[in-house]
Amino acid sequence: MTITTRSLVVGAVASAAALLLATAGVAMAAEPPSQITIGTLYARSGPFAVSSQNQFHGLQSWADAANKDGGVMVKAFGRKIPVKIVSYDDQSSTATARTLYNQLITQDKVDVLMADFGSVLTSVAVPLAAEHHMLLIDPTGSSTTFFTKKTDYLADVSIRASSIWPIPLGEFLLHKNIKRVAILYDANDFDASQANTLKSVLVKRGVTPTYFNSVPTTESNYFVLLHTIAAQHPDAVIELGYLDNDIAFLRALSNSGLHFNMTFTIFPGQLRELLTKNVGEKVLNYTYTYPTPPEVKYTDVTYGPNTAQFIKDWKDSHSGETPNFLNAAGYNAGLIIQDMLGTASKFTQESFHHALMDISGKTTTVLGKFEINANGAQVGEFLPVAQLVPENNKNKIIVVYPETRATGKALYPAPTS
Amino acid sequence: MALLEYALMGGVLYGIFFSLVAIGLNLVFGVMRMINLAHGQFVMLGGFGACVLYQDLGLNPILGIPLAIAGAVVVGYPLYYAVVPRLQRSRDPEMLSFILFFGLAQVIEAVAVFVFGADQRSLPPETLGAGSVGLLWQQFPDSWWLAASVSVVSILGLYFYLTRTKLGFATRAVMTNREEALVTGIDVDRISVIALIMGLALAGMAGVFVPFLLGSVDPSIGTGLTTSSFAIIIIGSLGRPLGTVAGGLVFGLGSMLMQTYFSSWSNLVPYGLLVIIVLVRPTGLFGRPLRQA
């Protein structure tokens, strides 16, 4: 059979066409998106609304700042790309959140998925993200149940895991030789994890809590509970709940006439202004809490603004309003996403996770050292123990433990007001 | 023993307060045969009213009581004539009222978020008295006693209205049989709108004490209060407002005792009791069995 000129020409044209198509396919695969979509939820109503919206505002602030700068550097495409936040209101409902997370993944097909505030609203996102092989950026969900096994689909970026978060508190109690400890906690992932961790720290050193009970997360009347606790004659009362629980607990405590040598609640350290507005300075006198950034300051950071710069930028863009921890947590989540996109060699979820593991342990931000383990738990971002001490009719946060980070001495037992 | 006594006394005070929270719902159902699923939202608005009076106007939050009554008239009268006659003419007014008032509840909550924000609001206890009052060697804050006193006075007032006034007799006639009352010449619409206004007023009055007894008020508490109220009126007797007192006491005592001895389960109390009462005595503690023709 002879090869004719005609067949040669046909073959050459076919080869050229195939080469062209192949090149076009490669070019299409490498086409960068016009925007990086970050999908998240927030609660406009319900028990988590205040915390969630503060965190969301932090993320929005980061996005605005990034877009003012022309977008975030995406290493996979070698250029800066603007970010867009795609968000929905979950009304503090896990059922609604589940549906909306699913929508973000399957309908909106967001590039980056970020959870709403807290362990309760994050809990429904964790299995969903894993099912869809999508990395979940988790700003403030710290429940130990999330981090039980190795995963490529979860990263806790802005809050320490509950399995280690309360360790300094437990060590402080032991350091002060406080033997009679009452622990009252909400029956949800976040608070129960903390309570169990705290209990195990104490029990390991021979201190068994004199009271260790849970209440429903919706509990709002602590009056009789406090008297039940007081009947055990504890020296320290540790209340682990959410914002509205802390408010109701502190109100009931001030109303009850009871006094304990030490009282600890979580949210004065995160939302001090709101707590003060609701319960008053006097009620918070000498209580203990976890102080959080930006109350805890980081001068030397490796990524993003340091604490002073963050506070200044926030005040400038929010009419002088001082940022709180949840604003910082949302902002920090954005910073970590930015660092992740600037490190990931490919624009895939797997590459994003590798990038986070690469920057883990090497990055310090406004929230402290970013370090996650193979299970996705945040093991950096240390939170010490602080006491609210009155000074000129206002409370000042004094870090009291560990001693290497202390800015003052704990007043124990707390004076009666 | 001291713990038990404290829980019992606390339970009685708490239960009396919750009787006031729930009694308006029962009155509205008893007269109009409609379930006001927005009842908790009106309680919530009463709480915000008290907060606004104190925090924004510098007035004592107790003035929220007359404000609640005035608000109930302003809201209740147009609300009734806008929806109820239409609902009454429909094929299934009870079910439709369920849906309509559910929608109203969502609207009220959304508007409350818009107007007041999502933040919790609380009031200093000193506004209702900085001390505590003791009875039977048990001390409770002034706000608890005041809430219980207002509740007792309001419930007694309702009792006297129903048993000693012409309008009250007519109300009871409507509650017994709406159609027969209509045929006998009773102005059923007038009786019903008064009952709705009274129901909303009682809810708003209860709301004034929510920041004191429940720690704080925020737009999301309404649904939980409606659910608790519903459980209380079923326990007491659906359609018999004064049976609500028994339901409230059972609820209060159950909650405080569970808080003392099994705190993790304290939220289950109203619903557990509801199930038991419905199984054992379906008409409620104070219900009368219906005569079968």
Image: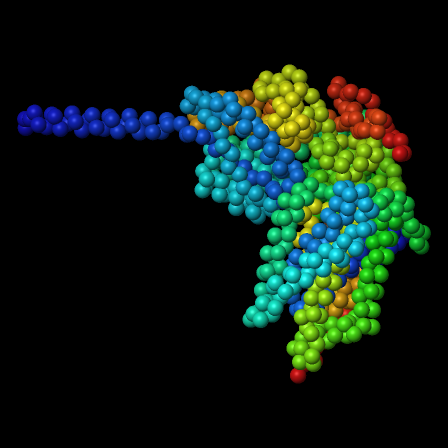
Is residue A273 at least partly visible in the picture?
A: yes
Q: Quadrant of the C terminus of chain A?
A: top right
In which quadrant of the rendered view does residue B65 lie? bottom right
Name the spot of residue A361 as percent of width and height, x first. Answer: 59, 21
- Colour pattern: rainbow
Q: Is residue B210 left or right of residue A142?
A: right
**Can residue A211 be seen in the rendering of this structure?**
no
Q: Position of residue A378 (x, y in %)?
A: 62, 28
| Picture coordinates of residue A54, whole percent (x, y) | 63, 34
Q: How many marks?
A: 0
From what the image shows, is residue A277 above or below residue A7? below
Is A18 on the left-hand or right-hand side of B108? left
**Placement of A76 over or under B176, stated as above or below:** above
Query: From the image, which quarter does the N terminus of chain A lie in?
Result: top left
- Residue at horizontal 87 percent and vertical 31 percent from the top: A414
- The residue positioned 77% from the left and 72% from the top of the image is B167
What residue is rendered at 64% in x and 41% in y? A49
Residue A209: percent from the left, percent from the top?
80, 38
A98 or B191, nearer to the observer:
B191
Left/right of residue A386 with respect to residue B103 in the rendered view: right
Q: Is residue B266 above or below residue B242?
A: above
Q: Quadrant of residue A276?
A: top right
The residue lying furthest to the bottom in this view is B293
Looking at this view, is B263 or A209 the one in front? B263
Q: Is residue A150 left or right of residue B201?
A: left
At a point 54% along the width and 35% down the height, the residue shown is A114
Outermost residue toward the right in this view: B137
Find residue B225 and report its image quarter: bottom right
